[in-house]
Image: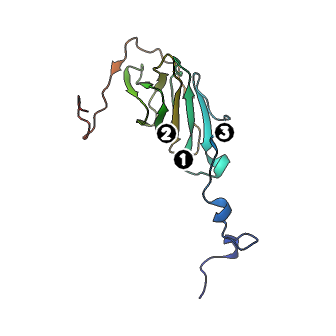
Amino acid sequence: MAHDHTHDDHDHDHAPRWKHDGVRVIPGNQLDPNTAQTPGMDRKAAINFARVGAQKLWAGTVTIHANAKTGAHHHGHLESVIYVVRGRARMRWGEKLEFTAEAGPGDFIYVPPYVPHQEINASPTEQLECVLCRSDGEAVAINLDIEPVEKPEQVLWVDPTHPRGGV
């Protein structure tokens, strides 16, 4: 029976290339701090093109010290998802960072493209630790000079399964 692959699909010991170019495990103590940074936070890359050849996503960690906040920024055309591992995240967004919402351990935060935002560690004592994923292998972080409003408007997250004031 004919094979529908070429010899280029195998390495020298006839094992498929994906044996070496397939699933990758990136140990948590080997993340790369050489990525786009925003004042007030520490981003480290786990998954990107340079490290594993990822074409359409970037993933890593974000740490914000107790009682600290980032500068205002956005991520260009990229979508971002933040998963809170430990601590309490307060997100501010908008032209003047006039909207706010909070998230805790186990919560996901979605940040659409071009949305000016700021991450704040809402805890005065505990470090905020998050996992971050973006929709492209690029590490885009565009820092902004925004004069925030004094009292941001709180926005309750509402969706069909969590109506306003619901559980």
User: Which is nearer the N-term, disc 1 or disc 3?
Assistant: 3
Between the residue at mark 1 and the residue at mark 3, the CA separation in whole angstroms equals 21 Å
Residue in view at x 45 percent, y 25 percent: 88
User: Which is nearer the N-term, disc 2 or disc 3?
Assistant: 3
Residue carrying label 3: 29
Visible residue check, residue 151: yes
Q: Colour scheme in the image?
A: rainbow
Give the total number of marks visible in the rendering. Answer: 3
Image location of residue 138, percent across then percent down: 59, 42
Q: Which of these two is toward me, 109 or 72?
A: 109
| Amino acid at circle 1 | Leu
Quadrant the C terminus occupies: top left
Image: 162 above or below 100 = below
Image location of residue 62, percent across then percent down: 56, 32
Residue carrying label 2: 77
Residue carrying label 1: 57
Image location of residue 56, percent across then percent down: 54, 50
| Amino acid at circle 2 | His
89 left or right of 32? left
Image: 70 above or below 46 = above
Residue in view at x 40 percent, y 35 percent: 107
Visible residue check, residue 141: no
Circle nearer the viewer, 1 or 3: 3
| Amino acid at circle 3 | Asn
Residue in view at x 57 percent, y 36 percent: 61
